[in-house]
Image (spheres, rainbow, N blue to C red):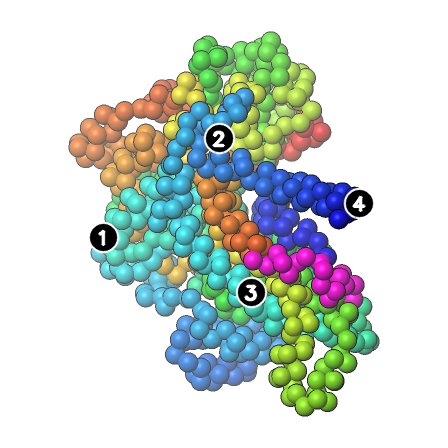
Amino acid sequence: MPAFGPPLASLFLSGVHDFASGEEPTHNEAQGLKSVPSLPVEYHVHRKCSNVAHVMLDICSTYRTTKTTKSGVNVMRILTVTVLLGLSTAAPSLADTADGASLVGQDWEAIVEMARGGEVNWFMWGGADNINIYVQDFVGTILMNEYGITLNQIPLADTVEAVNIVLGEKEAGNLDAGSVDMIWINGENFRTMKQGGLAWCGYTDRLPNNALVNWDNPVIANDFGVPVDSCEVPWNRAQFALAHDSATLPEPPRSIPELIEWIKANPGQFTYPAPPDFNGSVFIRHVFYYAAGGVDNLLGDFDQAKFDAAAEKTWAILNEIEPSLWREGATYPTSINQLNELFANTEVAFTFNYDPSQFGIAVDAGIYPDTVRSFGLVDGTIGNTNYTIIPFNSPNKAAALVLQNLLLSAEAQLEKARPEVWGTSPGIEMDRTDAAAQEAFAALPSHPSVISAAELGKAALPELQAGWISAIEQGWLANVGN
Amino acid sequence: MNGPSRLSRSMLVLSGALLIIWLILPLVPMLIWSFAHGWRFPDLLPQQWSLQAWDYALSDRSGTLESLGVTILIAALATLLSILVGVPAGRALGLYKFRGKGLIELMILAPVIVPGIAVALGLHSVFIQLGLTNTLAGVVLVHLVPTLPYMTLVMAGIFANYDPAHESQARSLGANAVQTFWHVTLPAIMPGIIVGGLFAFLVSWSQYILTLLIGGGRVITLPLLLFSFASAGRNDITGAIGIIYILPGILILLFTARHLSGSNGAVGGFGRI
């Protein structure tokens, strides 16, 4: 009798295993494009294509724009085309707007006309149903009704998967017919895309609603210390906050030194995710800022001498509290979701998040009790901005521009600021919008579990440049998490 | 009936019950989660029951039902193609000895041995050059990479225990090639096709990275939806989509269970080439 083991196990595990390996982009640096000499076999493909049925025209046209180096591959192509006749679901592209350079030369009305009737494929983290609903119901409906553009939202477990698709396409020589039109992005993934030449840049001033963006604000103009340089458009702002259950802990510690004392006095009730988890990493940076005596000294390029001084104190603090952590610090959660689960099950007394609206979402979903409250630190917490980016090889750049402009509008920013919709902070300056929008924004009710952005913003700290962040993460792994 | 056989029968019932509990028990929390609104330690049952997760999972905007159809179509096509390729390949490996057979067996096993992510990015590049990315056809084709080893190995095991002399007998009695295949070969290898097909279907059913890369987000299968919620800690929606996700597998197991009894001699040779 055959064992059921492999398929059953794979039913439950293999997919999880696939993504649990947490793929980082394996080639961070863009590799030079492979040379693609055009071979006589191209002609062969043409002729074959002209013979196949009408439904295959798409595939053939794709083939004509794709070049390969091996004639053996062409034989395979033809075979596959014949075998798979009719299986293709590729949609004919209506108006190809892959040529970004000529697009930025157009006026906005012309861009909107080119986008009309097309589609835009937006890859974004898809783990929150309320965000998915906002994007599909609110944004998608306006996009369809006013511009006739179909919005395809592609949910991701991890944003790096979309970056890998674009990277793979560039390496394979797909320069104008990519599958990704827009990504919700920031930080490390943005750096990969900008440095690898995967981003389309130099267009943001074409968007009418760009006037609502305050590019003079360094928190907007720099994405984790990397200058944006017109390669992406802000969508939301976020600032780190901690959450506690007011029913069991009415008065939480409100500074890093107080928190350290609290942890020692209450062993087993605190932990933080190990880097490279995004939220665990930012928690460690708060300790690092405290150990360095403030962030002012750390801004700018990475400085080994300054780093060494602050890092030594940071590791000493973190090693000192380690025996008082959850499970005596023998293990750390590997993701913020594990910490959230520990917090939901009251195993630990705090969780934290770079996006405080997540606390409200979790309360509304019944994951946390209603008594959960969130707070910032008296010395300030770190803030950042998240963006939308258009890959260099997107064939629907006009539609992506229309979508970006819509996302920046006062109407769309106001809607997502509603606590029952999402409750996130605007990426634009609300005081640059019209009076009605400002009034509505000021009148928004706040979620009791989410500390208001205004309250949190009274003490805000900047992010460090990527060089600092990776040095802190690696230092933690070597000195604390070993 | 004498004593020992009654004992062995009750042992059979007991082990059957244990097996069912072992298979079903892990699914119970998932079912409860899908109706839970708040289920925290140390409560045995959720604080509140809710249909919110199912409401979202079954709504148009979640895309669950649409991707259920897409997932079924892809898995069915991948299974069909696996059978078409795996049966002749299994016959060659099971019945004949030839130079380089060991090497070919190793290459057929390779996709199972090598981690998927290691080949996924390379395959992506090849599929872009073939113009097969972002299409259902491309996803079906790439699913053959992990499904074919199972199909071929099962069929090789079947053919290792298969006597081709039956075919010669049928031919000598006047049957043509098609009749021989239909009335002699096919019934003999049918259990293998069902087992191998089941393997292929479930392996295709659970693909994530290959589907995402080759499908380019245009082909959205259930694992894509499921993992974006599972990784975000949304146990309620994960539970609802998860139940929709495992149902086809369970249904197929139920329908094919009688072929998996092990009483058929042909299946006994599984794993031996």
The residue under label 4 is B4
Residue A243 among magenta residues: no
Q: Residue at x 52, y 38 (%)?
A: B30
Amino acid at the residue labelled 2 = Glu
Residue at the disc numbered 1: A145
Q: Would you call the spot at circle 3 few (<14 residues within 10 Å), some (14-19), or many (20 or more)?
A: many
Q: Pinpoint the chain carrying mark 2.
A: A
Q: Label 2: which residue?
A: A463
- Asked if badges 1 and 3 are on one and the same chain, I answer no
Chain letter for mark 3, please: B
Spatial separation of the CA atoms under disc 1 and disc 3: 38 Å
Which range is magenta? B255-273
Secondary structure of the residue carrying tag 3 is: helix
| Residue at (38, 36) in percent of width and height | B51
Evaluate whether label 2 is on the same chain as label 4.
Answer: no
Q: Earlier in the sequence, mark 4 or mark 3?
A: 4
Q: Amino acid at mark 4?
A: Pro
Q: In the rendering, at what x and y percent does residue A52 appear? A: 44, 82
